[in-house]
Image (cartoon, rainbow, N blue to C red):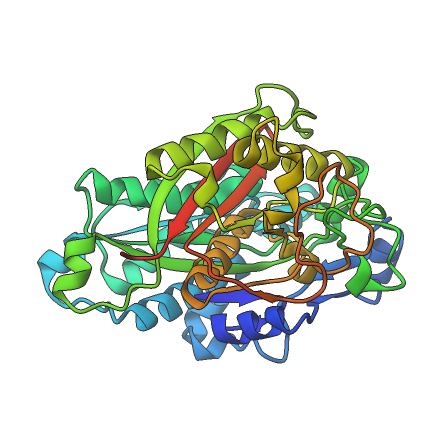
Amino acid sequence: MAITPLGVGVRTTWNRLLAGESGITSIAHWEPQQRWRELPSTVSGLVPRDEWRPSDWLSASDQRRLPTFVQYAMASAQMALDDAGWNPTKDEDKAATGVCMGSGIGNLEEMYETSLAFQQDGYKKVSPLFVPKILINMAAGHISMKHGFQGPNHAVTTACTTGAHSIGDASRFIAYGDADVMLAGGTESCIHPLTFAGFGRARSLSTAYNHDPPASCRPFDRARGGFVVAEGAAALVLEELEHARARGARVYAELAGYGCSADAYHITAPREDGTGATMAMRAALRRAAVVPARVDYVNAHATGTQIGDAAEAKAIRSVLLGEDGKEKEEEVTVSSTKGAIGHLLGAAGAIEALFSVLAVKENIVPPTLNLTQPDVGVDFNFVPGKAQEKEVCVALSNSFGFGGTNATLVFSKMK
């Protein structure tokens, strides 16, 4: 279900998250050191190398042929299918099962290295596997080929909203009758100097805490200065309710609503009033038939940027409290789990959806790490530093991306 900077496996990740641990570390020592050390940000959320063993999930041939983002996707998919108890053998069941797995950037390293080889030595230095290794939809493709799933095969790539769009789109395939079961999520592995150089030149990254990596991602905090690039994957199994009941499936939560919107404003920055986020949240609540007062928890997109965190906080306040709810702000529970794991880019929406589902299932809210001085203009319960026990019947999960693309998912307890 999950491969994150906090570990391999959802239970390991969740337990460490609730314990307030951080998966953010330094990459200044990576080779070539000249390229890494010259970068303004040298912190990252890395999947623990001592826990990630590709041979646990992939054949030797697949390990050679498949880029890391696809390997992460296949491993998280296998975890999710095993947890759901869904490994169909009948042709009709395979035809009714689909995959919706996206990525924001995918295999940047292959593009970089092949470009250099082609520039230096020409055509014959380009691998026949070059194109299959860089296509975003190959994560979904390889999952479907491994398991024989012949339902919808779909790949989303909407920057940092990818994981949420994947899950929301998958739910609509089920609602429209295109599938009974969908494996959905996001995956990312682009820990490469060019990634950090690009985001760094865009002034998007945290740079003030290279000396103290765990403190570098600071959602909603006064000292926030940008996001932390991270890697990993998460996958969820979505299933039509009667189909799940008929086979006695374990149900964690209901995906009750999905809303999308566009800022139509700027390539990287949101509108400061959070209009786009507001539209996505309201659309998701409307489709879920849930009134704002019933929302118990919001897993915020909040990456640790000055404008983005403040805009999202304003949007949450507008949706949940309206214009006259100042005295009720402290009753609104919001946290950003990026303080612990960084920003998984195309996988962020998927892992944060999974955290929201677990909050609903287990009635506990994960903390916002590194939050010592809230500075976003609202006085929410931001769950600073320590997880909180709380009945969570309805949770919102927000995801926003470059290009002004927004999505919100609503999860609720099964009645």
Q: Nearer the viewer, residue 407 or 233?
A: 407
Measured as percent of width and height from the top left, residue 40 is found at 86, 48
Q: Is residue 205 visible?
A: yes
User: Residue at left 48%, top 27%?
Assistant: 261
Q: Indicate the quadrant containing the N terminus: top left, top right, bottom left or bottom right.
A: bottom left
Measured as percent of width and height from the top left, residue 368 is found at 68, 58
Q: Nearer the viewer, residue 312 or 133?
A: 312
Judge left or right: residue 364 versus residue 23.
left
User: Residue at left 18%, top 69%?
Assistant: 248
Instruction: Report the number of discs.
Output: 0
Quarter-of-image position of residue 43: bottom right
Measured as percent of width and height from the top left, residue 276 is found at 56, 26
Judge left or right: residue 174 versus residue 284.
left
User: Residue at left 53%, top 32%?
Assistant: 319
Measured as percent of width and height from the top left, residue 230 is found at 65, 56
User: Residue at left 22%, top 67%?
Assistant: 249
Extreme-top residue of the structure: 264
Q: Indicate the quadrant containing the C terminus: top left, top right, bottom left or bottom right.
A: bottom left
Judge left or right: residue 341 versus residue 54.
right
Q: Nearer the viewer, residue 141 or 51?
A: 51
